[in-house]
Image (cartoon, rainbow, N blue to C red):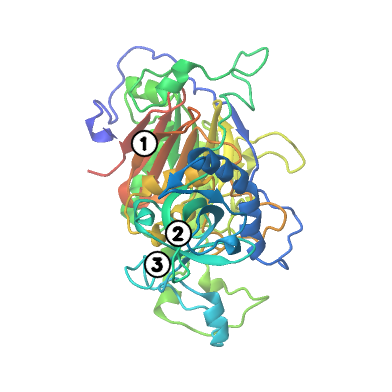
Amino acid sequence: MADLDNVPGNLLRKPSGKQEDELERAASTYKPLHSFRLAKEKSYQQQFADMYFLRLTKIRPAVEQIASEAWADTVIGGEEVKQVDRVLDIRQGELCWVVGTVYMEMALKPNIMEDVSKDRWISAPTSTNKYWSEEGDAVTLEDESGRIRLVGDALRSVFLVTGCIIAVMGTENANGELEVIDLKFPNLPPQPDRWAVSKPPGANGAAKTKTKDEDEEMTGTQTKGSGGKIAIVSGLGFSGSDASHAIELNLLLEYLLGEALDPSTQQELSQISRLIIAGNSISLDERKPEAEQQTEKKTNKKYGYDASSYNAQPSQLLDEFLATLLPTMPVTLLPGAQDPANSSYPQQPIHAAMFPGARAYTALPTSNDVGWFDNVTNPWEGEVDGWRVLGTGGQNLDDVFKYVDSEDRLGMMEAMCRWRCCAPTAPDTLWAYPFQDDDPFVMKACPHLYFVGCQPEFGTKVIVGPDAQSVRLITVPSFNATKEIVLVDSETLDVTRVKIAVS
């Protein structure tokens, strides 16, 4: 991890007496895919249950293929394993396998049906960081025909949450439960070649394909890259009242701009071609001004708006930060749980009206071009410097975290990739738009880079799929808490941390 305290000559100093070469920011090849954009006319009359049936329909063929190849001609105890088409076709004592959707029955999980039945129209706030408990939790498998409970030691060695699609092999016991012997996941989807959507700089023909050497560069070994960097930060937490954090945000801005640093460090920073901000740019603690916190007074509201419950300063500071940075660097902004965007998944872009200074760098609404300031959805998918990138503001991973007895967030990210679903718990415990015709959370293509923002600490690893797919996973820590920013090499996808703090 790099530390600005260790950078020699990082403070302002007198001129060296010689003319320094003018630096130029590295170019970024960028193509957003708009995979999670909602139609302008939205309908909320559908039932959420359709999403899980859509997900099962889309992922079932991949799971069935893997399971049939793995369990073909398998004989246990003199009995050959056979496939059944539906959960209700399972017969007691018969060895079989079936594909379905996992549903977790958990005592600590919020239940909207229970709230409605008790005339509790506003659901009670969740008082626990985990839904998981040792007693009272049950794993079930369901499809359009019915549901069956899963038991067995094989379930303890894997991550399972509501909404993931799996194939299980076992036999039904006398209690009507399926004793699981083995289970299979869809695994990583097909991975497109690098430059599958856009063309590399200087290309005059077909897109460049991924070579064997590029595959080896993704295995986690430190290789020499081209010097180009993609910066990722999350949890900026603009507030307007915390003076020390305001200083750190100013230091971050100066770092990205290359100000107050020596020429050698400025040369390195000029290779940062794009900044991605992954959620929670606004501090939740600053929603009310001090006057509102001291006394709660009933005031007349005009059209449902109460000025005393809104503080515009944090969003103004964010706009100033972006407007200062944008002339020198393109920015991609994902909303987060604390930002002024819709709360249901997928979150749509923060409205441009929130950025009176920065919106001058956005593309025209009627244009197909990409602006220097790209205000995107959460989750977001795009191609950056030829790499397929998938990123979120953190809500999907935070919700999966509540289901399992583990602190391994990178392992949960890997599980989501192998489930082929970036938000499996939506809409059960992660609020989501009621999709009727498609489930956009299903991974149609395997990303090369998958990052999740607003996490407690930094982490990274590379996972490999059965068809040589290679994915770099990154948990991006909240800058508000850790004062860290992540730099990704645009050629090797190697990762570096930089800590920016007031000593």
Residue occupied by mark 1: 461
Q: Can residue 153 be seen in this view?
A: yes
Q: Nearer the viewer, mark 3 or mark 2?
A: 3
- First of labels 3, 2 by sequence position: 3
Going 36% across and 19% down the picture, which residue do you hit?
A: 223
Marks 3 and 2, how far apart at CA: 9 Å
Q: Which of 479 and 209 is in front in this view?
A: 209
Labelled disc at residue 399: 2
Quarter of the image with the N terminus is: top left
* 179 vs 58: above or below: below
Going 39% across and 20% down the picture, which residue do you hit?
A: 267
- Given the current orientation, which residue lies at the most extreme bottom position? 119
Image coordinates of residue 309 in percent, x first then y, are 52, 72
Labelled disc at residue 131: 3
Label 3, residues with CA under 10 Å away: few <14, some 14-19, many ≥20: many
Image coordinates of residue 29 in percent, x first then y, are 58, 26
Q: What count of labels does the image hold?
A: 3
Marks 1 and 3, how far apart at CA: 27 Å
Marks 1 and 2, how far apart at CA: 21 Å
